[in-house]
Image (cartoon, rainbow, N blue to C red):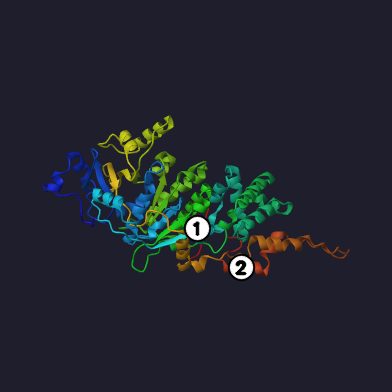
Amino acid sequence: MSDNESVPPAGTPEAAALPEPARRIASGYAFTGPALDLGALLWDGRCLPGAPVRIPLSVLNRHGLVAGATGTGKTKTLQLMAEQLSARGVPVFLADVKGDLSGIARPGQDGDRVRRRAGEVGQEWTPAGFPAEFYALGGLGHGIPVRASVTSFGPLLLAKVLGLNRTQEQSLALIFHYADGKGLELVDLKDLRAVTAFLASDEGRAELKTVGGLSSATAGVILRSLTAFEAQGMADFFGEPEFDTADLLRTAPDGRGVVSVLELPAVQDKPLLFSTFLMWLLADLFHDLPEAGDPDQPKLVFFFDEAHLLFDDASKAFLESVTQTVRLIRSKGVGVFFVTQTPKDVPGDVLAQLGNRIQHALRAFTPDDHKALRATVRTFPESAYDLEELLTGLGTGEAVVTVLGETGAPTPVAATRLRAPESLMGPVDTAGLDEAVRRSPLHGRYAQAVDRESAYERLSAARPAQTAPAPAPTSRQRPVEEPSLVEQVVNSGVFRSLARSVGTQLGREITRSLFGTARRRR
């Protein structure tokens, strides 16, 4: 359906065929500007192709929620929206937890079910593939490796991944503060472990006296957590070359937006890690992008799958940072859609900022399910439907929708039968994924890990000098005070050269964002 198509004008046969309540709902989706076509209105058990349900392109940076029970079609909804965004030149980021979104790069397969769905919603279905890049966290899986340095990841996100409590989180922030100030760059986990061990030592303990110190017990917890983290194979996620999030904003030569698919099946048993890593990507985008105001279309739409994992057992500081990032990144032209099972998985302060809602079916088999259902219904505006009954009776590929209209006002609640994606609704085979990765222009930049000299190497090099026996002073000589380990490190020629190369100055702390992630020069 073209941008200018809307509800049939009054007096036409198409408009006369719509029941009066359906006509009132459909009028709320009669936008004049560019919009994504979600599907067709459901009313009284019928699908009404003459009443399209749409979402304006200009409000996608007002964020959104895609929710619903397992198997209700959330993944296909992401695919449907990503296709249309790409076609309009908007880059998209998709977290592919189950590994079935890679098919967006291939044309879909024609068949009776697809044709039947297209006919029901008034869709002219044509198979199409879309430009896509495939990524994998740390290179675990099939995709271009995505890595972050420990310094840029920051203490707040790392504390979340390590499961530290509030006191331990504050101590970790102190370690980062010290490393930043002394120019001890934290590239990978062994760098962080080396600095933590030094600050817990007799010599290092004196370095933090003026800022509160680091207890041996807390340092021990942090070191044990890092060791356990590495034992799970997590060290690969931290290192260089670090991923430049500007690569998520690319368009293809034909003008279509590139769909960046982060392949997560290889780490789906570590959900806390990938959900926190997604937050790092978002935070990095936040402090790199310029202000955009309210653009006609977003610069990027970011789909944050398994969002509930991000908020489970999160500290107050972490939740405040998530809330502030989501609120502020809108003005950078980035839209964020959280994908989870029920709205109650998302904290109220974050949920209040999500202007667009696509709610798939909910199941109500237990008392807790009924409680969640009632809580979900209360998050919707008043509607012409019995939402408790409707939400438990929706079929796969159907959803209850309410979005922000072009004026910023919420649209009427609309039960919707969603369109069929035009790309392949299933995964690309492994050989096809690997071939796509090898052909990517980004492969040469990120494929090979680099382990350059950083905090671990400098601290290790300084220790032999510190432990070497000093000559005994003669009666005519005053004892010469041996320089501290840190003085040896920061005064070395190698350190000064490297510090200049990475733009780090002694005594000047790296500027950090809301999550404590370090700002990097592009």
122 vs 335, nearest the viewer? 122
Q: Is residue 345 visible?
A: yes
Residue 344 vs residue 225: left or right? Answer: left
308 vs 140: above or below: above
* Quadrant of residue 83 within the rendered picture: bottom left
In the image, farthest residue toward the right: 475
* Cα–Cα span, label 1 and label 2: 29 Å
Split into 4 quadrants, where in the image is the N terminus? Answer: bottom left
Question: Which residue in the rendered view is the most extreme toward the front?
Answer: 112
User: How many numbered circles does the render carry?
Assistant: 2
Quadrant in which residue 293 is drawn? bottom left
User: Which label sits on residue 498?
Assistant: 2
Say which amino acid is labelled 1. Answer: Ala
Q: Is residue 58 above or below residue 400?
A: below
Q: Amino acid at mark 2?
A: Leu
Callout 2 crowding tier (Cα within 10 Å): few <14, some 14–19, many ≥20? some
Residue at the disc numbered 1: 136
Q: Would residue 425 appear left or right of 55 to someone viewing this image?
A: right
Across and down, in percent, residue 93 comes to 41, 56
Would residue 509 be found to the left or right of residue 42 on screen?
right
For label 2, the SS is helix
Picture coordinates of residue 473 (x, y %)?
85, 63
Residue placed most toward the observer, 114 or 205: 114
What residue sits 33% from the left and 34% below the top? Answer: 388
Q: Residue at x 33, y 66 (%)?
A: 255
Q: Position of residue 458 (x, y in %)?
A: 67, 63
- 374, 173: nearer the viewer: 374
